[in-house]
Image (cartoon, helix red, strand yellow):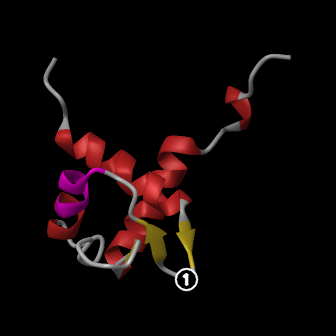
Amino acid sequence: MKLDIDKIDEAVLALLALGQHDGCRAWRSFDWESMARLREKGYITDPVGKAKSVVFTEDGARESQRLLHALFARHPDQDCPR
């Protein structure tokens, strides 16, 4: 199976948004390669350093919220049957 790296990066960006705190900061507890790619795409600040979190760029904050909604939002017609 060939992995779709862009889909992995989208999932990581959305998961980073779930750990968002102090405004635009997010815990950087994901794979270094994914974090490096997100930085190259301009979504987060440099993940290398002493800080245990990264900062979303304006584009990163906007894209992470879009992905959160697209990946994890429930629609009324998709509720689990009772």
Check the picture and name the quadrant holding the N terminus: top left
Q: Residues within 10 Å of mark 1 (few under 14, many from 20)?
A: few
Residue 57 in the figure: left or right of residue 74: left
Nearer-the-camera pick, 13 or 68: 13
- Magenta part of the chain: 31-36
The quadrant in which residue 77 appears is: top right
Whether residue 70 is in magenta: the answer is: no
- Between 80 and 56, the residue placed more toward the observer is 56
Q: Main secondary structure of the magenta part?
A: helix
- Left or right: 70 in relation to 79: left
Tag 1, which secondary structure?
A: loop
Q: Quadrant of the C terminus?
A: top right
- Residue at 30 percent of width and 73 percent of height: 44
Q: State the image quarter where residue 14 is shown.
A: bottom left
Q: Amino acid at mark 1?
A: Gly
Tell me what residue is drawn at x 46 percent, y 52 percent.
Answer: 15
Q: Is residue 35 magenta?
A: yes
Q: Residue 23: x, y in percent?
A: 55, 82
| Residue 34 % position (x, y) | 23, 53
Q: Is residue 35 above or below residue 61?
A: above
